[in-house]
Image (cartoon, rainbow, N blue to C red):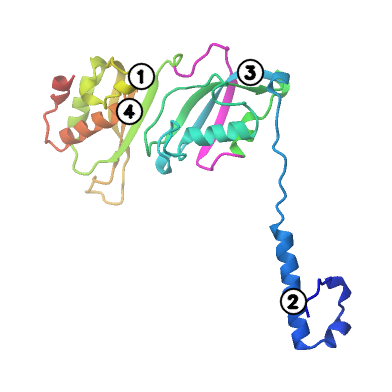
Amino acid sequence: MSLEVDSDNYDLENLNHLTKEELISIILDLKKQNCKKTDRKITKPKRTIDFTKYHKRHVVFKLLYLGWDYHGFAAQDVSEKTIEYELFRALTTCCLIESRQTSNYHRCGRTDKGVSSFSQVISLTVRSNGDDSEELPYCKMLNRLLPKDIRVVAWGPVQDNFSARFDCGSRTYKYWFPRGDLDVDLMNQAIQQVVGTHDFRNLCKMDVANGVVQFYRRITSADIKICSENNQFSTNRDYDMCELTIVGKAFLWHQIRCIVSVLMLVGCRKENPDIFKDLL
């Protein structure tokens, strides 16, 4: 027995008169019919927008992200696990931009693999309502599509020629590490040597392929402080958390990581506190 079965035609009385083999056959037929229904994919037509019919506005977005699970901020050809990839996926999905190439996009800076940011800024031109009093809810639209560890926290209108990269007044990096047996006072003495304008070619990773051939950068301030004291052990300060803060106009590739690496050697007394004078 193998029939196309309509379950509405079978009531309890009819089923009671069927044999075991007939019931099994009905169950198998129902299963086949159910599989056919679930295999039918309903494809929704992709939403398209004629961007020439909409107002546009040049804006800045302020965002934060936890970078531990990402391969850096900037988009890469070899990986989709970047902040920029997720950002532009959300921007194009909600039709705020047509493409990255046409969005007049600039970023304040880029962070390396595993690095987080609490105040990253980008500028680009997006679709607009054309009404200052009732603009599109940009943050809500993007956060609905972004992963939970990437959040757009604010936006604001800017002049059409504003660039988050070239109009940035200063950039701040913070680096946290446990005190351990490090001599923090010695490290603070050493880090003061990087303040000012110096040639940092010995404290960065070369990026000549991207046109970086000038290595002078100005550091306006640098200091290390104990930002969190662990009071569980009154006589052991190894678990205190230290915070290095460096402020400058711009930074080189891996400049902060190289500075921190040398600082750790100074803190362990494996290098002289004046080592930066030689490297600069």
Say few, some or many: other residues with alpha carbon within 10 Å of mark 4 (under 14 / 14 to 19 / 20 or more): some
Identify the mark nearer the N-term, 4 or 1. 4
49 horizontally vs 244: left or right: right
Residue 138 forms part of the magenta stretch: no
Q: CA distance from mark 4 to mark 2?
A: 69 Å
Tell me where residue 205 appears, x and y as whole percent.
27, 27
Examine the image and state in which quarter residue 204 appears.
Answer: top left
Q: Secondary structure at mark 3?
A: strand
The kind of residue on which mark 1 rests is Ala
Say few, some or many: other residues with alpha carbon within 10 Å of mark 3 (under 14 / 14 to 19 / 20 or more): some
Tell me where residue 103 appears, x and y as whole percent.
57, 21
- Residue 136 seen anywhere in this rendered image of the structure: yes
Q: Any mark on residue 245, and which?
A: 4
Q: Which residue is at a point 65% across and 30% down the rendered structure image?
A: 95
Residue that numbered label 2 is attached to: 27
CB atoms at circles 1 and 2 under 8 Å apart? Answer: no
The kind of residue on which mark 3 rests is Arg
Identify the mark nearer the N-term, 2 or 3. 2
Q: Which residues are magenta?
A: 145-165
Q: Which residue is at a point 35% across and 21% down the rendered structure image?
A: 210
Q: Nearer the viewer, mark 1 or mark 3?
A: 3
Residue that numbered label 3 is attached to: 57
Q: Secondary structure at mark 2?
A: helix
Tell me where residue 276 appears, x and y as whole percent.
17, 23
Residue 154 forms part of the magenta stretch: yes
Q: CA distance from mark 4 to mark 1?
A: 14 Å
Q: CA distance from mark 1 to mark 2?
A: 70 Å
Q: Which residue is at a point 70% across and 31% down the rendered structure image?
A: 48
Q: CA distance from mark 2 to mark 3?
A: 60 Å
Q: Secondary structure at mark 4?
A: strand
Q: Any mark on residue 250, and which?
A: 1
